[in-house]
Every structure is written in C-alpha cells, then in structure tokens.
Image (spheres, rainbow, N blue to C red):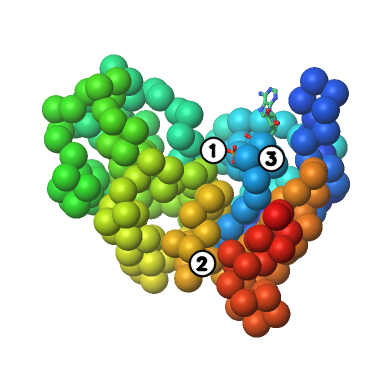
Amino acid sequence: MMNAAIRFHGVGKSFKKKSVLDNISFTVPRGEVYGILGENGAGKSTMLKMMANLCLPDQGEIEVLGQKPSWELYQKIAYLSDRAKWYSDYTVGEALQYGKSFYPDFQMERAEELVEFFKLDRKLLGKEMSKGQEARLQFLLCFSRDVELMLLDEPFSGIDLITREKMIELIIESISERELTLVITTHEIDEVEGLLNRVSFVKDTKIVVEGEVEELRLKSGSLKDLYRGVYA
Ligand SMILES: Nc1ncnc2c1ncn2[C@@H]1O[C@H](COP(=O)(O)OP(=O)(O)OP(=O)(O)O)[C@@H](O)[C@H]1O
C-alpha cells in the first residue's frame, strides 16, 4: 500500500527466549503522527529499532517507506534514541558538522537556528551535557534533516516543561510545512495527545488498542483515561 509509511505484519520478537512482541500488525499512514504507548519494558523501543533496521524481527514482515528496512533506508530516516551517545567526544558545533558530513539531507542553516532556539552553547562537549541538553541536541539533529520519516524514542524524556512546549511547537510547524511521518514513543501522554493522529497501546506482547485518536477520545474521553483503563 503506497500510503503506508510503515507496515508491520505478524511481527514477533523474543530476547533470551522471552517473547517481547507477538504477532504485531499495524500500519502508520504517510503524513501522520503515530504514537506508540505502553508501560516500561512493553517493547516500544524495540518496535522503533526494527523500523530503523537496528533490530531484526524473529517473525513477520516490516515495510518502511515501501521497502524492507536496510542500511540505505536508515540514512533516509531521522531516528532519535536516548541511548545513542555518538557525540560524547564532540562539541555541539562538531556534532552539527558531523551531521552535515554524514547526511546529505542535513540543513546546516536550520541546525544553527535550532542551536539558538534551544539555547545550546556550541562549545559544549557531549559528555559534559546534562540529560536535558543531550535531549535538545538529539532533537535538533533530527529536526535539521529533510526526511520523510522521523522515529522519536522518548524525545521529551528529561526535558523541562517550557522546552517540551517549544519542541511540540516545532513538531507542529514541521508537519504543517512538509509531508512528514512521525512515530513517537512517550510517557508524556498529556503533551502529545493533541499532536497524535493515531496511536497504539502495547501490553503483554500485543497491541491492545489501535486507532484514530479522535475516535478513541469520543469513546473514552482523554487518551490518559483510556491508558488508565488499559494498564491500571
Ligand atoms: N538487546 C536486548 N537484549 C535482551 N533483552 C532486551 C534487549 N532489548 C530489549 N530487551 C527487553 O525487551 C523488553 C522491551 O524493551 P523495550 O526497550 O523495547 O521497552 P520499552 O517499551 O521501550 O520500555 P521503556 O518505556 O522502559 O523505554 C524489555 O523486557 C527489555 O529488557
């Protein structure tokens, strides 16, 4: 289906013989903001890693932008992971240079604007950053790229309220300017509720709720209420 940015079909994954994801099928339509929600350890990051080709499924099939995940495809995707620390020995300025040399779609002018926007010191070294400064850098490195697909794993983790609001503004701006598909995992349900078009809730290796956020809200009130109903 051409309109799908991502398709999971019967995907399963185990670690050390323990099933983490079982028979997962869902579609992320192009141009939408898709949220993957669930408790700690539910398998959300694993799903994003599979999309980025950083983890292989044991069963099933995955399609990303109409292709099987691959290294070539990975370079066309902006992937934010709070575990990636490749910039530890770089300053902010050097990380930008690296981004430019590595990704042909990297927009240096936008990156410079975002450094100002996030009040980051260009001379600040990766390993000397606070958690929030790291999160800002990761976020700006993604949003400096001209890509069709962004995978954001916990982009707001450790970020103060005002910066989080700025990030959400930036996301809204980006999706209104160009066709961009975003997949986000987050525990900040309140903040993203207005942003998400579709959502899935992962629980005990399965997707237990999946659908359009507007429809789900009509049935259940807020996403947070629905979340409590599923997990509490
Ligand atoms: N490389 C790995 N080796 C062994 N187990 C793993 C590996 N990666 C993930 N797991 C296990 O898979 C499960 C799902 O992990 P994952 O990071 O996908 O969860 P998550 O939903 O993103 O959690 P959180 O909300 O805490 O970030 C966990 O039980 C985790 O311990």
At 70% from the left edge and 80% from the top edge, which residue is drawn? Answer: 219
Q: Give the quadrant of residue 88.
A: top left
Q: Amino acid at mark 2?
A: Glu
User: Which disc number belongs to residue 74?
Assistant: 1
Whether disc 3's CB lies below 8 Å from ligand 1 is answered yes
Q: Which residue is mark 2?
A: 193
The image shows residue 165 at horizontal and vertical percentages of 32, 60
In this rendering, the answer to whether 66 lies above or below 219 is: above
Q: Which residue is mark 3?
A: 43
Residue lying at the far front in this picture: please name it: 232
- Report the mark closest to the observer, 1 or 2: 2
Viewer-nearest residue: 172 or 43:
43
In this rendering, the answer to whether 124 lies above or below 43 is: above
Residue 186 seen anywhere in this rendered image of the structure: yes
Q: Dot 3 lies on which element?
A: loop
Q: Amino acid at mark 1?
A: Tyr
At 48% from the left edge and 36% from the top edge, which residue is drawn? Answer: 81
- Report the mark closest to the observer, 3 or 1: 3
* Mark 3 vs mark 1, CA separation in Å: 20 Å
At 65% from the left edge and 50% from the top edge, which residue is drawn? Answer: 38
Apparent side of residue 218 relative to residue 105 in the rendered image (left or right): right
Badge 2: how crowded within 10 Å, few (<14), some, or many (20+)? some
Badge 3: how crowded within 10 Å, few (<14), some, or many (20+)? many
Residue 70 seen anywhere in this rendered image of the structure: no
